[in-house]
């Protein structure tokens, strides 16, 4: 398929259609893991779909934990904007800008 197409529902069966680009974004994602686990390929003349689904790999379960850790850090920063300003060093940036040579015009 070259163009996205909506899923088809018929009783207990759901037929989903994916482009190559959509399948390529599923590698290592929850979408890809579900597709790899649940997909029933009905017709695949050249085996391309079968290979694409087989290449989905495993989900990076550490990603959710990493996101939670980063969100906790960001929440701490939201709670203390003065500390963030100190970390970013607004004043030292202004001081450094003052030390830059004056541009010359030619």
Image (spheres, helix red, strand yellow):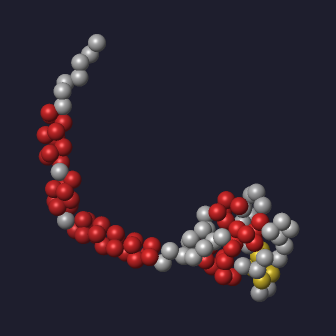
Nearest the eye: 10 or 49 = 49
Q: Which quarter shows the N terminus? A: bottom right
Quarter-wise, where is residue 19 in the image? bottom right
At 26% from the left and 16% from the top, the residue drawn is: 105
Q: Residue furthest top?
A: 106
Can I make out residue 17 in this image?
no
Q: Residue furthest bottom?
A: 12
Can I make out residue 89 in this image?
yes
Q: Is residue 84 left or right of residue 18?
A: left
Q: What count of labels does the image hold?
A: 0
Q: Is residue 4 left or right of residue 97?
A: right
Q: Position of residue 46 (x, y in %)?
A: 83, 66
Q: Which quarter shows the C terminus? A: top left
Q: Is residue 14 left or right of residue 99?
A: right
Q: Position of residue 54 (x, y in %)?
A: 69, 73
Q: Position of residue 86 (x, y in %)?
A: 16, 56
At 61% from the left and 68% from the top, the residue drawn is: 26
Nearest the eye: 13 or 61 = 61
Instruction: Look at the picture and state if 98 lies above or below 52.
Output: above
């Amino acid at each position: 398929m070259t163009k996205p197409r909506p899923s088809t529902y018929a009783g207990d069966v759901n037929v989903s259609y994916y482009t190559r680009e959509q399948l390529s974004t599923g590698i290592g994602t929850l979408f890809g893991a579900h597709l790899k686990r649940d997909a029933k390929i009905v017709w695949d003349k050249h085996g391309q779909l079968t290979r694409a689904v087989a290449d989905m790999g495993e989900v990076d379960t550490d990603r959710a934990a990493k996101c939670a850790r980063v969100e906790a850090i960001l929440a701490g920063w939201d709670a203390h904007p003065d500390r963030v300003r100190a970390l970013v060093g607004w004043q030292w940036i202004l001081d450094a800008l003052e030390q830059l040579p004056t541009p010359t015009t030619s």
